[in-house]
């Protein structure tokens, strides 16, 4: 990749270590703005267009916060039901993108369909950023997760990471691609029915990721530097709050991370989770020394500020 200026960011494929280091270097500068709760005017003349065909809390508001802290403006939609894409007309993705590119200088898109942001990028005359597409990827989440590990551990090289939960979820795919750039030792911990899809294991093999698979967190717990946790039975990405099931399936105790289990882990362990959580992460863990899932939100704004500034060619 080697340059973000004017480029789309829809996948972690092809993102090299120098690209990651550039984002992290700029994010360190942006952190000062986030920490002081102030703004800069780097993007004062730019508009960010939100195209969220799925609901979002962290990703959507994080991008809004990032753009406004850069001095820019935000337009767009966070629920397709409020647009012609989601009402009686069911406006096509192509037409929606062609309209939105006239209203903003960069588009951030979340969609339930795998590959939809890449399709949008092929249509749009402005850069498109993938904010999560179906069960495929979530590349900006991977950036902020890598940055969190870097800031909290001081390094990424050779880190031992346990990905715990449903391996079919997009967050794990993008993160594993990034971890490969730092020769991380990665363990996929999941039930058999939620194991890493074969096409993704083939992709990880191509990028040189060192990984193993197990059904037991206990087997590797003491060896890990980082646990990245998700549920083994998360709600569907295409179901909204009002449509959610009254009763959700419970997580097997093997994949619940609680304080009792953390007592057997390394004292320097970092525990990450992209949130929202269900029963795989009890609230008792919120006060544990390993907890870093709330600080991920802090780092996420700085990382997305860095990405936006780089794409707009305005990085400090």
Image: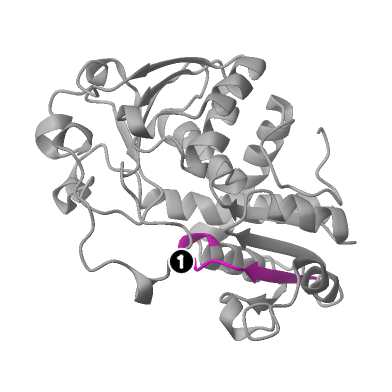
Q: Percent x, y for residue 198?
A: 53, 24
Q: Percent x, y for residue 9?
A: 73, 47
Residue 57 magenta: yes
Quadrant location, the N terminus: top right
Q: Nearer the viewer, residue 199 or 148?
A: 199
Q: Is residue 227 visible?
A: no
Residues shaded magenta = 46-59
Check disc 1: other Cα within 10 Å, few if <14, some if 14-19, many if 20+: few
Q: For the point 58% across and 43% down, which residue is it?
A: 136
Q: Percent x, y for residue 86?
A: 62, 79
Q: For the point 69% across and 83% down, which residue is it?
A: 84
Quadrant in which residue 91 is drawn: bottom right
- Check disc 1 and report the residue beneath it: 57
Q: Nearer the viewer, residue 170 or 29?
A: 170
Residue 246 relative to residue 46: left or right: left
Q: For the point 33% across and 68% down, which residue is it?
A: 244
Residue 83 relative to residue 92: left or right: left
Q: Is residue 269 visible?
A: yes
Quadrant in which residue 101 is drawn: bottom right
Q: Percent x, y for residue 119?
A: 78, 54
Residue 267 relative to residue 38: left or right: left
Q: Nearer the viewer, residue 146 or 245?
A: 245
Residue 104 magenta: no
């Amino acid at each position: 990749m080697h340059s973000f200026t004017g480029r789309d960011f829809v996948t972690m494929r092809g993102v090299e270590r120098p690209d990651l280091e550039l984002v992290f270097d700029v994010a360190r500068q942006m952190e000062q703005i986030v920490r002081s709760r102030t703004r800069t005017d780097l993007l004062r003349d730019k508009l960010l267009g939100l195209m969220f065909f799925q609901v979002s809390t962290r990703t959507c508001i994080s991008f809004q916060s990032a753009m406004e802290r850069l001095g820019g403006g935000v337009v767009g939609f966070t629920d397709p039901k409020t647009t012609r894409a989601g009402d009686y007309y069911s406006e096509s993705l192509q037409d929606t993108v062609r309209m939105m590119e006239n209203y903003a200088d960069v588009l951030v898109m979340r969609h339930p369909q795998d590959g939809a942001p890449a399709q949008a990028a092929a249509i749009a005359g402005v850069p498109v950023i993938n904010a999560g597409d179906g069960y495929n990827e979530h590349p900006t989440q991977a950036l902020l997760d890598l940055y969190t590990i870097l800031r909290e551990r001081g390094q990424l090289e050779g880190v031992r990471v346990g990905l715990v939960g449903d391996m079919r979820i997009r967050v794990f795919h993008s993160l594993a691609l990034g971890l490969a750039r730092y020769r991380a030792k990665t363990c996929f911990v999941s039930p058999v029915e939620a194991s890493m899809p074969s096409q993704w294991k083939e992709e990880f093999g191509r990028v040189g990721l060192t990984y193993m698979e197990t059904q037991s967190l206990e087997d590797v717990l003491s060896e890990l530097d980082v646990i990245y946790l998700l549920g083994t039975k998360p709600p569907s990405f295409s179901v909204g709050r009002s449509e959610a099931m009254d009763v959700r399936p419970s997580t097997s105790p093997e994949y619940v991370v609680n304080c009792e289990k953390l007592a057997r882990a390394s004292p320097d362990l970092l525990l990450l989770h992209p949130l929202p959580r269900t029963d795989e992460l009890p609230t008792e863990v919120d006060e544990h020394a390993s907890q870093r899932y709330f600080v991920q939100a802090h780092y996420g704004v700085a990382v997305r500020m860095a990405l936006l500034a780089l794409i707009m060619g305005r990085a400090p």
